[in-house]
Amino acid sequence: MLTYKEIREFIERNDSIVIFRHIHGDYDAYGAQLGLKELIKNNYPEKEVYSAGDRDIINPDFLDDMDNPDVETISRSLCIIVDTSTRDRVENKNYLLSGNSIRIDHHPYAEEICKHEMVDPSASSASQLIVELAMDSGWSMSARAAEFLYAGISSDTLKMTIDKVDERLFLDLAFLMKSHFSVNKVNRAIYDQNTELFNKETQLRTRIRFEGDIAYLVLSDKDLKIMNLTYREAKDMVNIMGNIAGIEKYAMFVEYENGYGVSLRSHTHPISWIAEKYGGGGHLNASGISAVKEEDIKYIVKLLKEA
Ligand code: AMP
């Protein structure tokens, strides 16, 4: 596994760097990507640093614009892939043109994406690994870099409420806090909903189905249209089932192109094996599946009950 020193050496050896992340980016994917970009720009001002991918998330204004450099630039650059567990989940496959790529990730190991990788599933988030890279390297941390990295850590730890919140994370956060960014500002920028979305979420709560210690939501394309919700907005609301007494596992099924996209969550029991059965993956307690058939939903709910 790559060490922080070796990652730093890769960065120092290359004049041009492009940072990639997983499709349907969340704040950890964007946070690690843009936090790392900001850190390299601040600490190695002579280097060219680019981000690749779309900017499709609730509250995109918090993010910077994506650079999406041309293929010629990518092929002569060091490509760094953050927060991505498999090759097919890298949003922009042009990293393959480079032949000079490394990965920094915290998902349970699924497959090799690059020859040189740091994969540490004990970390709360990819953003935490970037904070540690900065600490190990003695880099200066700007308030903007800290905002991105804090957003990633906060969102992947469900606002510091999961078991991966430990002494190591608090030491890393203490380092981040030295840059004097505002936690409150980041919190508002990434979690605030406009009143329209807030009201839609209230409506969604009335549709949650409960079975034993399971809660789940199924939203067809027709439902989305009636509620005027996008796929992305709906999927991001999975956590509304996260604090219901007696509910240990919960799931969201949302119709998308050729099937239903699935988000599975669990407070304690591992559920990633269910996602893997249907071609998906992710973390032990937070996993996803790209597409299942409508008739698979009842089997997935049954497996969740058994998990
Ligand atoms: P989501 O439910 O989409 O928020 O995803 C939860 C976690 O599972 C994230 O860490 C994702 O990167 C991962 N994940 C989601 N969908 C897939 C998939 N189709 N294959 C592998 N991992 C996935």
Image: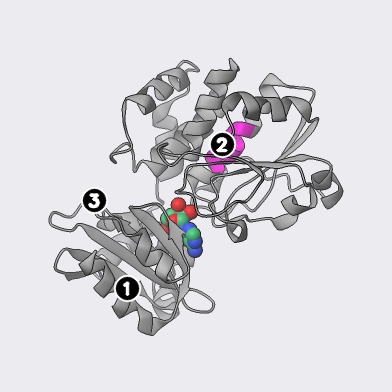
Q: Amino acid at mark 1?
A: Ile
Q: Which residue is mark 2?
A: 1
Quadrant in which the N terminus appears: top right
Local SS, label 2: loop
Relative image position of residue 109 (x, y in whole percent): 49, 49
- For marks 3 and 2, the one nearer the N-term is 2
Q: Nearer the viewer, residue 39 or 300?
A: 300
**Dot label at residue 300:** 1
Q: Which residues are magenta?
A: 30-36
Q: Which residue is mark 3?
A: 268
Local SS, label 1: helix
Q: Residue at x 50, y 74 (%)?
A: 256
Residue 10 horizontal side relative to residue 105, left or right: right
- For marks 3 and 1, the one nearer the N-term is 3
Tell me: residue 109, above or below residue 116: below
Is 251 included in the stretch rendered in magenta? no
